[in-house]
Image (cartoon, rainbow, N blue to C red):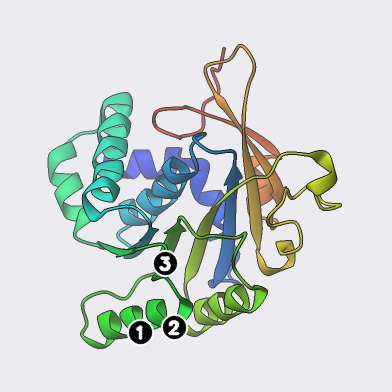
Amino acid sequence: MLKQELIEKNPIRHLKGESDAKESSRMGLVMARAGLGKTALLVQIAMDSLMNDKQVVHVSVGQSLDKTKLWYDDMFKDIAEACKLDNAGEIHDSIMRNRMIITFNESKFSLAKLEERLHDLVQQNVIKPNCMVVDGFDFVKTDRAVLEGMREMAKTMDLQIWFSAVTTDGVDSQSAAGVPAPCNGLEDLFNTVVLLQPIAQSDCIDLKIIKGSAAVSKCGKLLKLDPKTFMIREDCK
């Protein structure tokens, strides 16, 4: 398979709403219980931007640089093997040059520090990202004003920002729209909200679209994901 064929085949890009011409700056949220694949889906979203020759910043809170790099290497290897991608090594080296990883200790992360680092990278012409993924953000301890600041930053930088969040169990902790805690009072700040769920007696993972634009709805409200590549599958058992 050629690179362009892989890009066209992967409908995960619709989750980002990039066909919505009016909204180039957006915020998205991936929710799931611990260990179900939030980081993997964020990396898949970032990989889709990289495959389209766009620049990506991956913000990792509480995870090392080497471990974050390994997520990308493993994901790319799984996709390349599953899709029999031509010139995989050359494509890998090419697209990873457009990725910048920024790491924070959990106690050191703040919006001000993130803005400072991004500003320095842009001013020094190191990278001008179209997409940023934020993994390990603590929604339990954060203040709504921080997310409002992130949304304003997305508009200022013409940027898509995707977050991951660990869900809290219990129907009572969900919003009317079905967004679980700890994000059940924050869904208005996000253009897209998706929930990963295990499927009983299946080799796939459910991706439920709780909130999305017209472009996102092209995917349907419930998608089946391959647990290795996190690409959409139609042959789940």
Check contact, mark 2 vs mark 1: CB within 8 A.
yes
- Callout 2: helix, strand or loop? helix
- Circle on res. 112: 2
Q: Judge the density around disc 2: few (<14), some (14-19), many (≥20) Cα neighbours within 10 Å.
A: few
* Label ID, residue 204: none
The residue to which callout 3 is attached is 107
Quadrant location, the N terminus: top left
Q: Nearer the viewer, mark 3 or mark 2?
A: 3
Left or right of 7? Residue 2 is left
Q: Quadrant of residue 101?
A: bottom left
Q: Residue at x 51, y 42 (%)?
A: 11
**Measuring 58% from the left and 76% from the top, which residue is drawn there?**
146
What residue is rendered at 62% in x and 59% in y?
A: 140
For this orientation, the residue located farthest to the front is 107
Q: Determine the CA span between mark 3 and mark 2.
A: 13 Å
Along the viewing direction, whichever of 92 and 102 lies nearer the viewer? 102
Amino acid at circle 1: Glu
- Residue beneath label 1, please? 116
Is mark 3 in CB contact (under 8 Å) with mark 1?
Answer: no
**Along the polypeptide, which appears first: circle 3 or circle 2?**
3
For residue 158, above or below residue 101: below
Q: Nearer the viewer, mark 3 or mark 1?
A: 3
Q: Position of residue 145 (x, y in %)?
A: 64, 79
Whether residue 95 is visible to the viewer of this picture, yes or no, is no
Amino acid type, mark 2: Ala
Q: Residue at coordinates 51% horizontally, 76% vertically from top-left?
A: 154
